[in-house]
Amino acid sequence: MSGPVAAEDARPGEADCGQPDEPEVEVTPSRHADVGGVAVRRALPRRTRRTVGAWCFADHFGPAPAPPGMAIGPHPHTGLHTVTWLVEGVLLHRDSLGSEQPIRPGQLNLMTAGHGVAHAEETPGREPSRQHGIQLWVAQPEGTRHGPPAFEHHAELPVVGLGAARITVLVGALAGAASPARADTALLGAEIATGGGTVPLPLDPAFEHALVVLDGTLAVGDSAVRPGALAYLGRGREAVDLTAAGPVRALLLGGEPFAERIVMGWNFVARSREEIDRAAADWNAGDEERFGPVASALARIPAPPPRP
Ligand code: MN
């Protein structure tokens, strides 16, 4: 999956970092978008909620029948990590570092863009499975965002039982389990899966947190959270109790509020509109020193023209 971030999601020059808030539950509806022919629910960014920690983008796709599947041709990224997590199906990732990696449910793909990377993602041939998952972006801080690209695949991640839930830690640490995945800022990403019951989650009060429900309905205080929404929990919480009347799968996102003012445009995270325009021009000029070629049969996706 990939963006792009549209005008209604990213106000040029106004993409603030989200203000840290007191404990609360703020439920923001996702925006329905279309990425490469696949319907997605965009939980982040929203006008009223730009970031949660360094998490700056969240596209929940499916569940949908695979045919014709996803076919997202080579496109560039800068200044962010892409984090791909599947509930059902298989996706094949190819990038300009030479990586060629299928990803399946329970595994993590984490690509670091830095100064520039390109990749393609598609449903591999002869895979009859359905597609259901989420792609997230993490904004890189000033210290690493101009650096080299990188790619990690984690076939196994730490899993811990907590109350009625099975928790998989994608990034950061939760309930004593720490992920081996790269994080350039203090960050948390974890999947919560339960057949029903109460999940007592310990939280870091220095972090802000949010939930994206992928399946089922999760109760947080008086709020019922379903797919198609982001439930922002604020910061300053030592713990939160989640309650499920039936099967639920959700992602917990958290982190220290991102201190830098970011600007998002198309598939880029930067600090100014000029940086976005330069990255788009470099991609459209075929700058292989910056973005590199991707060994994919799919058509390269051109960057849209700069906004007036
Ligand atoms: Mn992408």
Image (cartoon, rainbow, N blue to C red):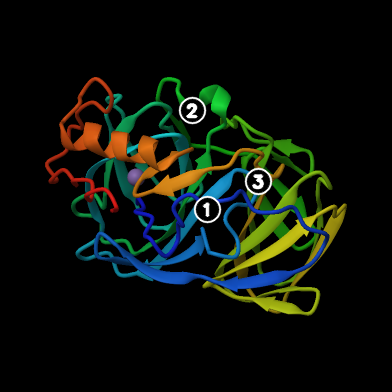
Q: Which mark lies nearer to you, 1 or 3?
A: 1
Q: Amino acid at mark 1?
A: Glu
The answer to whether mark 3 is within 8 Å of ligand 1 is no
Q: Looking at the image, is mark 3 or mark 2 earlier in the sequence?
A: 3
Q: Give coordinates of residue 64: x percent, y percent.
A: 34, 70
Q: Looking at the image, is mark 2 or mark 1 earlier in the sequence?
A: 1
**How many other residues sit within 10 Å of disc 2, few (<14), some (14-19) or many (≥20)?**
many
Q: Give coordinates of residue 46: x percent, y percent.
A: 53, 63
| Quadrant assignment, res 179 | top right
SS label for mark 1 = loop
Left or right of 240 in this view: 258: left
SS label for mark 3 = loop
Query: Is the Cβ of the residue at disc 3 closer than 8 Å to that at disc 2?
Result: no
Number of numbered markers: 3
Q: Give coordinates of residue 171: x percent, y percent.
A: 61, 39
Q: Amino acid at mark 3?
A: Gly
Q: Which numbered circle lies on residue 14?
A: 1
| Quadrant assignment, res 209 | bottom right
Q: Which numbered circle lies on residue 145?
A: 2
Query: From mark 3 to mark 2, how far is it between C-alphas?
Result: 16 Å
Q: Could you tell me which residue is drawn at 73 percent across and 78 percent down? A: 223
The residue closer to the viewer here, 43 or 239, is: 43
Q: Amino acid at mark 2?
A: Arg
Left or right of 230 in this view: 304: left
- Image vertical order of residue 284 relative to residue 147, above or below: below
Q: Which numbered circle lies on residue 53?
A: 3
Query: Is the Cβ of the residue at disc 2 closer than 8 Å to that at disc 1?
Result: no
| Quadrant assignment, res 216 | bottom right
Q: Which numbered circle lies on residue 221?
A: none
SS label for mark 2 = helix
Query: Is the Cβ of the residue at disc 1 closer than 8 Å to that at disc 3?
Result: no
**How many other residues sit within 10 Å of disc 1, few (<14), some (14-19) or many (≥20)?**
few
